[in-house]
Each structure stands twice: as C-alpha cells, then as structure tokens.
Image (cartoon, rainbow, N blue to C red):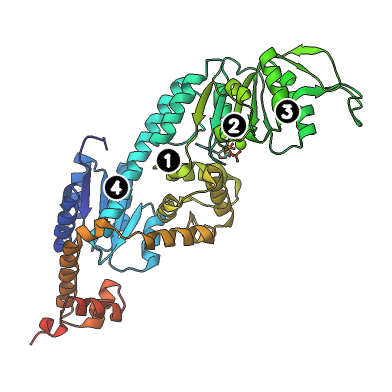
Amino acid sequence: MSEQTTPHILVVDDDRDMLETCRKMLSFGSYQVDTSDRPEEALEVYRRHCHDLVILDLKMPGMDGLQLMKCFHEIKKDQLVVMITAYASVENALQAVRSGAFDFVRKPFKMDDLLLVVERALRFKALQDENQKLQRKLSESFRAKEIVGRSRALKEALVKLHKVCEVDVPVLIYGESGTGKELFARAIHENSLRKEKPFLAIECAALPETLLESELFGYERGAFTGAVQSKAGLFEIASGGTVLLDEIGEMSPNLQAKLLRSLQEGCVRRLGGNQERPVDVRILAATHRDIEAMIQEKQFREDLYFRINVVRISVPPLREREGDVPLLANHFFDLFSPKVSKNVEGVSAAVLLILEEYDWPGNVRELRNVIERACTLTESTQILPQDLPAHILSAVEEKKSASGGDFQRAKHSLIEDFERSYLSKMLSRTGGNVTEAARFSGMSRPAFHRLMSKYKITSSDFKED
Ligand SMILES: Nc1ncnc2c1ncn2[C@@H]1O[C@H](COP(=O)(O)OP(=O)(O)OP(=O)(O)O)[C@@H](O)[C@H]1O
Ligand SMILES: [Mg+2]
C-alpha cells in the first residue's frame, strides 16, 4: 500500500446482504472495496489487484474461509487477512489467527468494530512496508540494523545519530530507562572511524565512588590496600576507541572534577601514580536525569556539562514511538523463540494489539522482557494474551474502558441501522425463533433479547402465519 493511494480491500462472503453491508461500512471509512460471493471469482479478482487487505467469512459453503485464506497465502505469502465469524466461538476465531489471519471480527459486528480492525490491519501493513524500506536504506550505508523501529520519533533520533557518527565529538544521550541509550552509543561507535578499536561502557550509578574512580583511571601498585599490582583504567584500555559513561548524572562531584580535568588535558593519572598518560578516547555519556536542572541545583558541574554535551541525542520513550511496538515485539520474538525448545510460530494479532495499547514505563527493555517471558511460558503455537503479565492486561483493560470514543458517537446511527437489520435478518431466517436466531449469531438468548427490546423488534413479526 503506498501512502498516496486509497487502501484497496476485498471482501468475500456467500451472503450478499452481508457483502453489501460491509461495502457500505468500508466505503464510509473511505476504502476502495471489491466484493465477491464466490471463492473462485474472488481469487481471480485478487490476482488482478493484489488487495491491501482481504476480509473473509469463516463459514462458507464449498470452500471455507480457512481454505480460501490458504489460497491467498499461496499467491502472496504475507497477505493480510481478517476473518468474519458468525459462529463466534473463541476457538474458531483463534484457529483462524493461528492459521495466519491477522485478526477476526465477530458477527454481528458494529461498523466501529470492523473499521477498527481494518484500520489496525492496514496500519500494521504500512508499518511492515515502511520498516522494510527503512531497514534496507539504513543497512546500505549504516550499520544500525539492530535498532528496530520506524516511528517518526525514532527516525528523528536516528537521523541525528547518523550525523554524529563520523564527527569525533562527545555526545550526550538522553532517554528514559530502557529506551536504548546504550544501543545508540554502540551504533555511534560502530559507525565511527574508531570502530576497529574498543567500545567500553561503564555504569556510573552501579559502582561506589572509589571503585568507579579506579575503574576509570586505573591505579598503581600500593595505591590502596589490596592494590597488589598496577592496573590500567578504562580510558587507557579503550585507547583509540570509545567510552560510554552511563548514568553520568550519578557521578559524584569529586569524580566529576577529576573527569573534567582529564578531558581538558587529554591525559589521565592513575590512582597513587604521578605519571600523566595521554589518552585518546571519544566520550559518550548517557543519562535519564535532567542535567540542566541538576546544574541549577548545583549537583552537576556546568563546565563538565559543556564538555560532554557537544551534541545531544534524545532517545524517545516507547509510548511516543507510534507503530514501533509490533515491530519490536516480532523482533524480540525472533530473538527468543529459537532459544525455547517449543514450536512457537509467532505473536498473535490479539497480543500485538494489547501491547500497542500499553504505556511501557520500562520502555524497550520491558517489552523485551515481556516477550522473552511469554516465549518461555506459552503452551500454544502462538503467543496469546494469557502469556502476558497480568498487570499489562489489566492496565490495557482500564485504559480501554476509560476512553469513550468520538468515533463511536459519530457513527452511532449507522451502527444502530446495522444492528437492527442484522436482528431482523436472523429472525426472518429462523421464522421468528429467538433461541435459534441467538444460537445462529453466537449470542446468548438474553443478550439477543436485550437487543430486540432495544430496537423494539418482536419475534411475532417474523413468524409465518
Ligand atoms: N530500537 C531497538 N531495537 C531493538 N532493540 C532495542 C531497541 N532499543 C532497545 N533495545 C534493546 O532493549 C534493551 C535495553 O536497551 P539499552 O540497554 O540500550 O537501554 P538503556 O536506555 O541504556 O537502558 P537503561 O536506562 O536501563 O540503562 C537492550 O536489550 C536493547 O538491545
Ligand atoms: Mg543503559
């Protein structure tokens, strides 16, 4: 699907009324729609147009939706398919998803239900297409293949990353925890002129001050109790390469002063030593803290800040990377699924939708952990919602119920029209037998009855005399 053209959708159902309803609903969503009530004809039409999305009824006489989906997939391996199922057992629908459908819609569906699934499917396709393009482009000139994502926010950061690689200046990388700051730092190094030399990262928050100092600058024998032999520090070991000072906001004032001195003079002095040793390293620093605010509060040296903040890159939080979650989820699935000795084929569409709704306070690292855990726990051939941590499921549920929907209100009357005609159709099929009609539509009898009362429909209108 190109960005300029109207998405083209093919709907296949043996029920012509249903086809017409779908055509109307989808046209309302400004899609270009083809319909067919015969599988052979549908395949013919598909061969000519290769639609962006195919919507199939699961139960059709002759060739059913699953078989037909297989035919589409034989023509185009990754064709997006959405199933419509009247026999709304979760089992049927899940089987469709397991067999390669992107998602399913249950009859009777409201226009919102259909349009929502269609929009998501098309967005997913657009993401996949874009991501492939982006990955191709990046891999031609730039070795950052492992940075997955195609959102505008990430792309902006990647453009900046690209620019700073070959300019040998210090870079300060900002970003919430788990956003990929270290990944960015590595990418800078790997695409710089220093790439053949070491890349060393040190976590400033994890080490007590004295240990961090000796790690960074090294020490001479006898510098402190236990220093039985001399040791070179990180700056010396990484000579010619790159050092990442991770969580630099946590560095003590004393060490900040020492670091500043080394950066200004281009040399280090080991603990307990007096020889100045020249060092040649590129400094990258990362932090999740607001360093400017720390300067105001006198917790961070302004002169050091100017040294390390020659260029700044902000890595966006995952909740601001629209569309990246499914790509990352699939990426991590590909990473972890070969490590579990199970036959897991993929992440189900239902899970991708849930993951997209979640806010990801722990960012990409949290997503990575969730997928790793799900690959280990799953007892199915797909990662299913029940393989996700309970707190994610409940957070998404809460979010959904809190958000009303202008979309829904705007189309309310059309939905009502649809529900009314669906009820009538079911009742006329069964000659006014409510129990049968409810069973036929996959609803409980009380639920069916409630809908009938809502629209003031009485079963006697459909009974034959
Ligand atoms: N865009 C991405 N594509 C693929 N993997 C990613 C991406 N961003 C982050 N990761 C992975 O997520 C994990 C966390 O990334 P990383 O350690 O770089 O984050 P960080 O910002 O340094 O985290 P922290 O603040 O906790 O130090 C790593 O396993 C990394 O490989
Ligand atoms: Mg980190």
Q: Position of residue 434 (x, y in %)?
A: 22, 82
Classify mark 2: residues with Cα within 10 Å, few (<14), some (14-19) or many (20+).
Answer: some
Q: Nearer the viewer, mark 2 or mark 3?
A: 2
**Residue 218 against residue 246 in the figure, above or below:** above
Classify mark 3: residues with Cα within 10 Å, few (<14), some (14-19) or many (20+).
Answer: some
Distance (Cα) linking label 3 and label 4: 64 Å
Give left or right: position of 233 versus 404.
right
Q: Earlier in the sequence, mark 1 or mark 4?
A: 4
Q: Earlier in the sequence, mark 3 or mark 4?
A: 4
Quadrant hosting residue 403: bottom left
Residue bearing the label numbered 1? 321
Instruction: Say if mark 4 contacts mark 2, CB within 8 Å.
Output: no
Residue furthest to the bottom: 465
Any mark on residue 440, and which?
none
**Residue 153 against residue 197 in the figure, above or below:** below
Give left or right: position of 398 versus 388.
left
Residue bearing the label numbered 2? 295
Q: Residue at x 19, y 59 (%)?
A: 411
Q: Secondary structure at mark 2?
A: helix
- The residue closer to the viewer here, 295 or 370, is 295
**Residue 302 against residue 102 in the figure, above or below:** above
Q: Residue at x 58, y 22 (%)?
A: 306
Q: Earlier in the sequence, mark 1 or mark 3?
A: 3
Distance (Cα) linking label 1 and label 3: 36 Å
Distance (Cα) linking label 4 and label 2: 61 Å
- The residue closer to the viewer here, 292 or 84, is 292
Residue bearing the label numbered 3? 255
The amino acid pointed to by label 4 is Phe
